[in-house]
Image (cartoon, grey):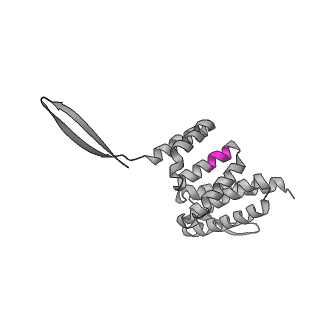
Amino acid sequence: MSSQVQCLEDAGQGGALLSLELELEEDVETEIHHFVKLARTGDYAAAHDFYDHTLHKHDHFFPVVAEYADMLFEQGSYRRAAEYLERQLTGKKRALEADELQLLELMESLANIYCDGALRDALVQAKRARVHLERIAGRVSTTSSYKTEGNPTLQASCVDSYSDTQIHIFEVYVAIVALAFQLNPS
């Protein structure tokens, strides 16, 4: 974004025209941090207002989408979260990285459990997420492996080797599985 400023200075009898062109750069990361602070402190009205007036124009940027969806979850606005994520995923799947797509689809599935009781679809999506994470675990350096009764060898990987997005995928995966056990304990 550029802006031109023209200034007329009085230089005695004549004037001097000064033309200055400035490059203005938005700091989206700082804006996201401010938004997250509003949401985490429960000031949802201010967070929505800030999103509508500042962050909305950056909704093509994955962190903006993920943080806004997180705020809708925190607020308990599951229908809005499901609708928002559906809009964001429509037509943008090719622009997202695999982890980003996996997280947004998983979040949409969790929202749909709360909205429509779509447990089966969410469990299918959770299984895809687990497979996705297992593939990543195969590429991540491991610190140890161990056997558990009835399970094949599991690999305990360093948490530092996973991205924030991958950790968030795991958190949403666990939320879906826990909700499934709550809704269907047998």
Q: Height in image: 57 above or below 38?
A: below
Looking at this rendering, what residue extends furthest in the front direction? 13
Q: Is residue 67 visible?
A: yes
The quadrant in which the C terminus is found is: bottom right
Query: What residue lies at 71% left-to-right and 49% top-to-bottom?
Result: 78
Query: What residue lies at 61% left-to-right and 61% top-to-bottom?
Result: 89
Q: Is residue 71 magenta?
A: yes
Looking at this rendering, what residue extends furthest in the top direction? 12
Q: Height in image: 88 above or below 71?
A: below
Report x, y in % for residue 84. Answer: 64, 53
Q: Quadrant of residue 9?
A: top left
Q: Does the magenta stretch include residue 68?
A: no
Query: What residue lies at 65% left-to-right and 58% top-to-bottom?
Result: 86
Query: What residue lies at 57% left-to-right and 39% top-to-bottom?
Result: 49
Q: In which quarter of the image is residue 3?
A: top left
Number of numbered tags placed on the structure image: 0
Left/right placement of residue 121 relative to residue 40 reads right
Q: Height in image: 159 above or below 2?
A: below
**Residue situated in front as seen by the camera: 10 or 142:** 10
Looking at this rendering, what residue extends furthest in the left direction? 13
Left/right placement of residue 114 relative to residue 81 reads right
**Residue situated in front as seen by the camera: 151 or 30:** 30
**Residue situated in front as seen by the camera: 19 or 117:** 19
Report x, y in % for residue 172. Answer: 67, 55
Q: Can residue 103 be seen in this view?
A: no
Q: Height in image: 122 above or below 42?
A: below
Range shown magenta: 69-74
Report x, y in % for residue 34. Answer: 51, 40
Assign the magenta stretch its main secondary structure. Answer: helix
